[in-house]
Amino acid sequence: MKNNSTPIAWGLRIVVAVLFIVSAIAKLYPSPYFAISTFEVKQLYPMGFSPEVAVFFSRTLIGIEMALGLLLLQNHWLKRFIIPATIVLLVVFIGHLSYETFISGNSGNCGCFGELIPMTPVEAIIKNVIAVGLLGYLNRLLPKGSDAPNFWVLTTVLFASILGIFMMAPIQPPAPEFTVSQPTVVPQDTTPVAIETPDTIAAPVAKTKVDTLATAKVVQAPKEPKKVSSGYANLFPTIDQGKKILCYFLPGCDHCRDAAKELTQMRKTNPSMPPISIIFMNEEADLIPKFFEETGATYPYQIIEIIPFWNQLGRGKDTPGVKYLWNGNEVKYWWGIDSNQFKPAELQTVLKKSYEELKKSNPKL
């Protein structure tokens, strides 16, 4: 039994070990601090973790994943501790993912492999159930008394793995809600568009004598939302005045570049398009010049830190984010690359609607 099962047992150990090691490494992609911060905001904050606890829990969890993957490839306490501990961790993941699927549905990236390999919760549940089955079979294949007795190997690998994660992604001081990472000198929109005009233009005054009271009624300004603070005036001073488009982009995000290209095209074909401002995440900020080069226009922008960026984007939301604001009021918000993604036709339609039409669908205006 022992000789026949050895190749199979080693095959199972390698498969599950690679699964755990890749999962840990993927949570560090494309850069450790960015990936771990994203994991904290998207996965841990919704679970109730405070920012102070999340920074420690995230790095410890990734270190444990890495350690379990490595420890599955050695023989010390393998059957009595490592395999049971790995199964318990997988069962916890399955329970959490099942709850999230029941509450929020099977949508979005579960974060099991970070941003490297997006997986839905159901896909992750299936993957974890298979891994539990493989580990259960492996535990049966290993004979009793096959464990080597050195417990120090376990503790050394565990603490070295956790320490390694903390070293690769050091905990940084909490960033303020808006941390501008560039001088407050923003480039102006270079897209050739007409000068912005009011939404309604009064008819020319007739040369003949007219009833001034009647004329006043004709040119009366249309209704518009009451002016409120959007919270972005410290970045863009005129953002709460009239109609504006505010975007959340990552400089290296292909989907963000596509959305920016579509907005630029709309400005070229529609001179009354509202001014566009961009909030960039401070990740690969050196790519911003290339971003504007590819999208065909340069817009006013600011850069904020990773965690404040995700918080401002909104819980459960992803880039690219495009907001239509009117006097600081959020009229429409597009985000991500699924059902809520930005659609130029929808923006074109909502821009044509009057205040009364918009208020019917959005009573908060």
Image: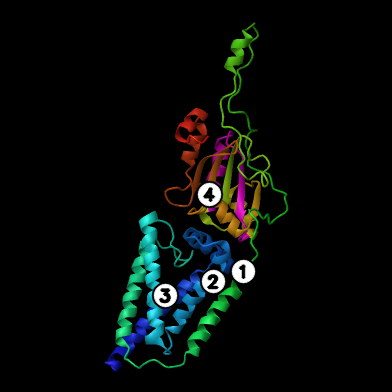
Compare marks 2 and 1 and give the one earlier in the sequence: 2
According to the picture, the residue beneath numbered tag 2 turns out to be 59
Asked if labels 1 and 2 touch by Cβ distance under 8 angstroms, the answer is yes
Question: Which residue is label 4 attached to?
Answer: 321
For this rendering, which residue is in front, 292 or 185? 185
**Amino acid type, callout 4:** Gly
Give the distance between the C-alpha atoms of the residues marked 2 and 4, in whole angstroms.
28 Å
Question: Which residue has dot 3 on it?
Answer: 19
Crowding at label 2, few (<14), some or many (≥20) Cα neighbours within 10 Å? many
Q: In this view, does 97 lie above or below 316?
A: below
Question: At x 68% / y 57%, what residue is drawn?
Answer: 181
The amino acid type of the residue labelled 2 equals Arg
Between disc 2 and disc 4, whose residue precedes?
2
Quarter that holds the N terminus = bottom left
Disc 3: CA contacts within 10 A as few (<14), some (14-19) or many (>=20): some
Dot 1 surroundings within 10 Å: few (below 14), some, or many (20 or more)?
some
Work out whether mark 2 precedes mark 3 in sequence or the reverse, and give the earlier one.
3
> Is residue 68 depicted above or below 209 in this figure?
below
* Mark closer to the chain start, 1 or 4: 1
Q: How far apart are marks 4 and 3 (CA)?
A: 32 Å
User: Which label number is shown at residue 118?
Assistant: none
At x 32%, y 83%, the residue is 138
Numbered range of the magenta stretch: 256-284
Q: Distance between the residues labelled 1 and 4?
A: 27 Å
Residue at the location (58% across, 44% down)?
246
Is any atom of residue 249 visible in this view? Answer: no
Tell me which label, 3 or 1, sits earlier in the chain. 3
Which residue position holds label 1? 171
Percent position (x, y) of residue 77?
Answer: 41, 88
Q: Marks 3 and 2: in contact by CB < 8 Å?
A: no
